[in-house]
Image: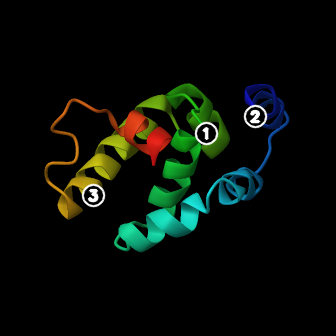
Amino acid sequence: MKEVLDILVNNGASIALLAYFIYKDNRFTERIKTQYSHLTEVDIQLCILLKLRFTVSQISILTATSPSSVSVQKNRLKKRLLQKDEHLFDNGQTLDMYLWLY
């Protein structure tokens, strides 16, 4: 799977195509939208890319933003998730780990 994702990124695959892969993975997009209905489309896209284990650098390339902007987006996403469950990351789990296991 990692090789496929690298090929997609290197060839400029759209986020929609990447979302299709994650959709096939236990309907991730549907589940996260249901549990966290207050997330924006940009938040959902970021969740998908993080679920696919993209790095901040890779996400910045795909979204045509700076790595620091992606880091800020991740921070905001984490805060939005914490609005629903303030104890979500109490056990030391990172946002990335949470989404990988989601």
Element marked by disc 3: helix
Element marked by disc 1: loop
Q: Is residue 84 left or right of residue 40?
A: left
- Going by the numbered disc 1, the residue's amino acid type is Leu
Residue that appears at 59% across and 32% down = 54
Mark closer to the chain start, 1 or 3 = 1
Gap between marks 1 and 2, in whole Å?
8 Å
Q: Residues within 10 Å of mark 2 (few under 14, many from 20)?
A: some
Gap between marks 1 and 3, in whole Å?
20 Å
Gap between marks 2 and 3, in whole Å?
27 Å
Q: Which mark is on residue 52?
A: 1
Vertical side of 16 occupied by 30: above or below: below
Mark closer to the chain start, 1 or 2 = 2
> On the image, which quarter does residue 24 sit in?
bottom right
Q: Is residue 98 left or right of residue 49?
A: left
Number of numbered discs present? 3
- Going by the numbered disc 3, the residue's amino acid type is Arg
Residue 25 is situated, as x and y percent measured from the top left of the image, at: 66, 53
Q: Is residue 4 left or right of residue 27?
A: right
Element marked by disc 2: helix
- Going by the numbered disc 2, the residue's amino acid type is Leu
Residue 44 is situated, as x and y percent measured from the top left of the image, at: 50, 59
Q: Which residue is mark 3?
A: 80
Mark closer to the chain start, 2 or 3 = 2
Q: Are marks 1 and 2 in contact (CB under 8 Å)?
A: yes
Q: Which mark is on residue 5?
A: 2
